[in-house]
Every structure is written in structure tokens, then in C-alpha cells.
Amino acid sequence: MFQSDGDAGGPAARMDAMLAAKRRISTPDLVDRFRDAMRRTAAGVAVVTTHGPAGRGGITVSSFCSLSLEPPSVLVCIRKDSTTLGRILKNRVFAANVLAQDQSELAAAFASPATPHERRFALGQWVDTGPAGPVLVGAVAHFDCKLAHVHDYGSHTIVIGEVVEAASHDARPLIYAEQAFHRLP
Ligand SMILES: Cc1cc2nc3c(=O)[nH]c(=O)nc-3n(C[C@H](O)[C@H](O)[C@H](O)COP(=O)(O)O)c2cc1C
């Protein structure tokens, strides 16, 4: 990193200003390249739900993944302005439902910011008696989690859950890549 020489108008300050201007020019291009590269990166799809004092809610994510075996833990990255994130942080529990290949309509419903949470649950069959959040019948797997840790980073919050229950079912996973849903061959 360039060291400041303490002179407000000196060469170090001019270099700082030059680097800042360069960053401003290159950043939008990098964000576009980052998005393009991520679009090519295939991922599974989950609907992360929550219930409790803040009400129930759910969001479609592709960022759900395993974090640790001991203790069994998962993570999901959620945009800071997500209405579901606020509910998860207040309820302190969430359930991750990994979607099956015939559940892409659900993925679309839970990715629609204009759809109120209760209307999102109108699609599919939900069992809402678990410890963490509504569980989707026919999903490939579900993980009931208690909120263990959150970490803000950039535009998103990393939500870490300790798994209190997990189940898997005989179904094939839905895949998201190149801005579309796919089935495994
Ligand atoms: C396939 C797919 C994957 C997504 N993955 C994420 C994700 O990992 N994190 C996230 O914050 N939003 C993700 N989104 C976008 C959210 O689902 C969307 O912004 C949603 O409307 C947020 O709802 P909320 O603001 O009511 O919580 C994804 C959307 C789709 C279609």
C-alpha cells in the first residue's frame, strides 16, 4: 500500500488521488466481469425460511453451503436489504430447504421481492411444526438451524447456522447456472 508522506498536497496525496480515480473507473468493469463469471458458476438452489416472533419469511438463495462438520454448520450469504434477513436475525432460527428439480416455480416465487412472504408460501406444501422454519415437502434435503453467528461483508451478510436437525429425501436437485434453472442429465 502506498504510504502517505503527511503532506496534504504532496506527491503521496496526488498518488492517492490518482489511485482512487483509477479504482472508480475500473470498478464497474470488474463488477460486470465478476457477475459474468459467477453466472457461469453452477449452484444448487435453496429456499431459506424462518419463523418466530418476527413472523415467517423465506428467500431463494444459491449461496447456501456446508461450513463445518463439528459442530454441523452451514452458511448462507444474504443481501443486507433482504426482508427475510431481518426476520432471521430477529427469530434467530432458519431452515434451508434444498430444492428438487421440479420446484423451480418455488424458486421464482421466493425470489420475487414484490410478493409478500405469506403469498410466497402459497406455492408448495409446507410443514410449519419444526424448530427453525417452514419445511418444504418434496425438497431434496432440509437443515433446521439455530443462528450461530453473523458477519457483515460488503453488500451481504454471512449467516452461519448450527444444524439442529437434517433430513434428505429421494429426489434430484435443481441447478442454477447461466441465469436459468437446469436438471441434472
Ligand atoms: C437462483 C437464485 C439465487 C439467489 N441467490 C441469492 C443469494 O444467495 N443471496 C441473496 O441475498 N439473494 C439471492 N437471490 C435473490 C433473492 O431471492 C431475492 O432478492 C429475493 O427477492 C429477496 O427477498 P426478500 O428481500 O424479501 O428477502 C437469488 C435469486 C435467485 C433466483
Image (tube, rainbow, N blue to C red):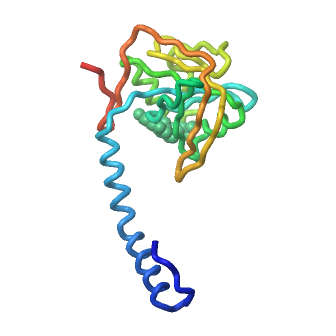
Q: Depth check: 183 or 167 in front?
A: 167
Tell me what residue is drawn at x 67 percent, y 25 percent. Answer: 51
Tell me what residue is drawn at x 57 percent, y 86 percent. Answer: 6
- Asked whether, in this view, residue 62 is left or right of residue 177, the answer is right
User: Is residue 148 something that shows in the picture?
Assistant: yes
Image height of 123 relative to 161, above or below: above
Quadrant for residue 49, please give it.
top right
Quadrant for residue 135, please give it.
top right
Tell me what residue is drawn at x 37 percent, y 32 percent. Answer: 43
Tell me what residue is drawn at x 32 percent, y 42 percent. Answer: 39
Residue 117 % position (x, y): 60, 30
User: Is residue 114 something that shows in the picture?
Assistant: no
Residue at the limit of the structure toward the left, as seen here: 185
Residue 94 % position (x, y): 62, 27
Residue 140 % position (x, y): 44, 15
Residue 10 % position (x, y): 49, 91
Count every numbered label the image shows and give the total: 0
- Asked whether, in this view, residue 3 is left or right of residue 28, the answer is right
Image height of 106 relative to 31, above or below: above
Residue at the limit of the structure toward the right, as seen here: 53
